[in-house]
Amino acid sequence: QVQLVESGGGLVQPGGSLRLSCTASGFTFSNYWMIWVRQAPGKGLEWISALSNGFGNIHYADFVKGRFTISRDNAKSTLYLQMNSLKPDDTAVYYCAKLSPSITELEYWGQGAQVTVSS
């Protein structure tokens, strides 16, 4: 069965960095678009970034452009999110998700990784 396991979250000071990882199994990782989303306390899901299966398409939400970088290692079936210049507003649970073949739906997502940005 499909599994997505996020890791790398934690507590970081404003201006600091973290790298999230998402290890995938149960499907051919290299064939699918993958995304990162987050949910802050009391708020809905917020899309952060998407990366195509062929590396040719990368998209970011405006609020993370220039600070976050999405990448993937298909050989390791792993998705990454490098987060720099973190702000308190970035505090949230971060989820990786597999998109459907039509890239219109979130098919599966992991259990999430808590990121807390605080001094």
Image: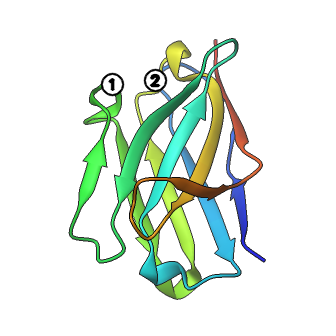
User: Dot 1, how many residues are within 10 Å of its Cα: few (below 14), some (14-19), or many (20+)?
Assistant: few
In this picture, is 30 found above or below 103? below
Residue 6 found in image quarter: bottom right
- Determine if residue 4 is in view: yes
Dot 1 corresponds to which residue?
Answer: 63
* Mark 1 touches mark 2? (CB < 8 Å): no
The answer to whether one can see residue 12 in this image is no
Quick check: 36 left or right of 94? left
Residue 43 percent coordinates (x, y):
62, 15
Q: How is the image coloured?
A: rainbow
Say if 53 sits above or below 114 in the image: below
Q: Secondary structure at mark 1?
A: helix
Q: Where's the N terminus, which quadrant?
A: bottom right
Name the quadrant containing residue 66.
Answer: top left
Which element carries disc 2, helix, strand or loop?
loop
At a point 64% along the width and 12% down the height, the residue shown is 119
Instruction: Please identify, in this view, whether the residue under mark 1 or under mark 2 is nearer the observer.
Output: 1
Q: Nearer the viewer, residue 40 or 116?
A: 40
Pick the residue in front: 30 or 104: 104
**In the rendered structure, which amino acid carries the disc numbered 1?**
Phe
Instruction: Kindly identify the amino acid type of the residue bearing the numbered disc 2.
Output: Gly
Identify whether 37 is placed above or below 63.
Answer: below
Q: Residue at x 35, y 60 (%)?
A: 51
Q: Is residue 91 left or right of residue 32?
A: right
In whole angstroms, how far apart are the C-alphas of marks 1 and 2? Answer: 15 Å
- Label 2 Cα crowd, 10 Å radius (few <14 / some 14-19 / many 20+): some
Q: Position of residue 20 (x, y in %)?
A: 59, 51
Q: Residue at x 56, y 71 (%)?
A: 78
Q: Which mark is residue 15?
A: 2
